[in-house]
Amino acid sequence: MFYNLIRRFLFSINEEKSHIYSLELLKLFYRFNLLKPFFIAQYPSTLMGLEIPNPIGLAAGLDKNGEYIDALASLGFGFIEIGTVTPRAQPGNPKPRLFRIPEKNAIINRMGFNNKGIDYMIERIKESHYKGVLGVNIGKNADTPIENAVEDYLTCLTKIYPYASYVVVNISSPNTKDLRDLQNKDNIEYLLSSLKSAQKDLEIQHQKYVPLLVKIAPDLTSEQIKDIAKVAINVSLDGIVCSNTTVDKSTIEDSPLAKESGGLSGAPLFDKSNEVLTALLKELDDSIPVIGVGGINSNKDALHKLRLGASAVQLYTGLIYQGPSLVTKCIKICNEPIIYN
C-alpha cells in the first residue's frame, strides 16, 4: 500500500528523474532505519564459490555508480551488482532515453552506459559498509573503437579487481554502437581470453580470486549461443548472466512506444530470456553457473528461472512496478523444492 502511494508520485514525473528520486528516497529511508521490515529469513547457498544468503540478486543498471549500495542491500538481496561502469565518465545517449510502459510492466531504455567512471565508483565502494557479495558490471566507452574494446575492459577489470566479489563483462547492451558485435565467436574468444589471462595475474597480485562472467543478449541465434557456450567452457569462464534487454519489440507492438529504439525489459522479456537461458544451459551441461535475469515480475517468475536451472536470479524492472516487497516475496520461494525438467 505504502509503495503504491510512492509509485503514484514517481510515475507522475519524468522517467529519469523518477529513477533518481526513487533511489534518493530509498537512501533516505535507509538512513532513518525505515527499511528493517524487509529483513526476512534467508536460504544460504553458494554462487561461483561465493557464499550468498539467498539466490535473489539485484541486476546491474539500477545503481550505475555504486552510490546506493547500502540502501539497496537493506532490501534483503543475496547479492548486488552495480554498473555498467566504463573507464572514463560519459554522459550516455541524448535524452529522452528512458520510457515506461505500465500496461505491459515494461521499460525501454537507451541510456548508453551513462556513468561517472571507474575511479568514482571505487571511491563509493570504499565508503559503503556492505560486506556481502558485490558484483561489478564493466563496459567500454562509447568513443572507444570496437577493435580497441579489450583495452577498456582490461582497464576496468584491473582497477575494480580488489573491490569486487565478481566482475561481469557487458557486451550485450543494444545502446552502445557495435557493442553486440563482441558476442561473435572470434571477438568474444579474444576478449575473454585476454581478460582471463589478466585475471590470473591479478589473482597473484591481490591474493584473491574474483570470478569473471559475461552478460549476453536475448537476441542471439542458436549458433551464437553454441559458440558462446564453447568459448566460455574453453576459457574456463566462471559464469554467465542471461540475459540483457531485447531489441525485439514484437511483444509490445500495440504500444505507441514500440517504435522507440533501445532495449526492452520487464514482463515482455520473460519468455524470450527463458528460451535463451534454456538453450544456453543445455550447451553448458552444468559446467558453468548461469544467473537468470529478464522479466521477473513475481516470485513465481523467479522460481521458474531457478527451476529451469539458473543458479541464481536478478531483479530490476520488476522492482519498479512491484516495489521492494518483490525481493522478500522472491526470497520466500527459495525454500521451494527445485525440480529440473
Image (cartoon, rainbow, N blue to C red):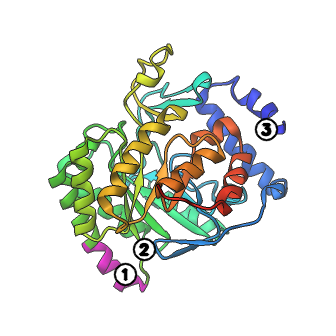
Q: Secondary structure at mark 1?
A: helix
Name the residue located 42 percent from the left edge and 49 percent from the top edge: 89
Q: Which residue is mark 3?
A: 3
Proximity of marks 1 and 2: CB atoms separated by less than 8 Å: yes
In magenta stretch: residue 24: no
Q: Which residues are magenta?
A: 197-207
Amino acid at pointer 3: Tyr
Alpha-carbon span between mark 1 and mark 2? 7 Å
Mark 2 crowdedness (10 Å alpha carbons): few <14, some 14-19, many ≥20: many
Q: Which residue is mark 2?
A: 210
Amino acid at pointer 1: Glu
Q: Position of residue 54 (x, y in %)?
A: 63, 65
Q: Position of residue 284 (x, y in %)?
A: 32, 61
Q: Which residue is mark 1?
A: 203
Is residue 226 shown above or below 110?
below
The secondary structure that most of the magenta stretch takes on is helix
User: Would you identify the image quadrant in which residue 175 lies?
Assistant: top left
